[in-house]
Image (cartoon, rainbow, N blue to C red):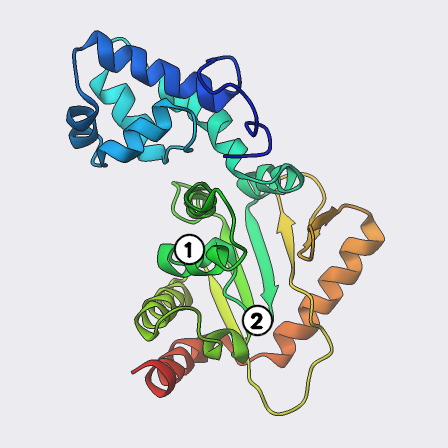
Amino acid sequence: MTAETDGADLADPTASTLAHFGNEVRLEREALGMSRAEFGAEAHCGYDLVAKVEKGVRVPPREFAEACDRVFPHASGRFLRLWPLALKLAYPAWFRPYVDLERKATVVRMFQPQLVPGLVQTEEYARAVLRAGRPTNLEDLVTARIERQRILTRDDPARLWLVLNEAVLRNQVDSADVMRRQLEHLRQLAENPTHRVQIIRDRGKHHGWASPFGLLSFKSGADVAHVDGFPKGYVLADAADVAAAQDVYDLLTAMAEPPDESPELIDSISKDCYS
């Protein structure tokens, strides 16, 4: 349930794009004489997810929309075209402009002092982090966060540059198993020649920056900066603000260990903390 659908009559297919998507699924499924369980088997999901999508109370993953277009004979790609509109409801309204920019970016640079950034979180890690805020739409938030990561695996992937405090690797989120898998994912990114991962070692002195922030670059147009914070983040497009963020990011990369040393360091911390 999102702010846009809260209090709406979800039986009305015009209540939201999510309700419309779900109603279209139901109409197509019933026209084929399929049960929810039968369609769930085709879409590799359970009855419960099909029911919630049809009722307009769950944002479907992309694979669900792809299954609709595959199974329903007259879909003609309609569900994958509708799906981005439904997915938007899973993001807070203030965050949607950033997601749109991130999707267009060719280079994404991020600094995080405490947590693994959402763009590279495993599903288990993301669920644990998001659960801490006790949201009413946890699964929608997880779906949306994991979907953002598609920019790293598309045909023309965005280049990612991460600078992380060592504390990010040592701050345990959920179980040791969850952390091991998350650090293994970071290690794989660090070894991918497209991306860069740098760790700022904890040597007892703080480097001066505690706020997570990032920079987005594009094929054309100026860079923008994004500052994460409570209760909401914000995008900075002013040239002076972006230049200041770029300068700080350059300093942080200079303070961090070289990218080639990251895999070994990640392995060492994983063994030390989570074996």
162 and 26: which is toward the camera: 26
175 and 266: which is toward the camera: 175
Name the residue: 61% across, 37% down: 96
Name the residue: 38% across, 62% down: 192
Toward which corner of the image does residue 260 lie, by quadrant?
A: bottom left
* Most distant residue in the right direction: 240
On residue 114, the disc is 2
Give SS at disc 1.
helix
List x then y, in percent, for residue 14: 51, 12
List x then y, in percent, for residue 80: 38, 23
| 143 with respect to 112 (left or right) | left
- The amino acid beneath tag 1 is Arg
Q: CA distance from mark 1 to mark 2?
A: 16 Å
Q: Is residue 77 above or below residue 200?
A: above
**Quick check: marks 1 and 2 in contact, CB under 8 Å?**
no
- The amino acid beneath tag 2 is Gln
Tell me the mark number nearer the camera, choosing from 1 and 2: 1
| 46 with respect to 192 (left or right) | left
- What residue is pinned by disc 1? 127
Looking at the rendered structure, the number of numbered marks drawn on it comes to 2
Which sits earlier in the primary sequence, circle 1 or circle 2? 2
Work out whether residue 25 can be spotted: yes
List x then y, in percent, for residue 269: 40, 83
Work out whether residue 75 can be spotted: no
Give SS at disc 2.
loop
| 190 with respect to 63 (left or right) | right
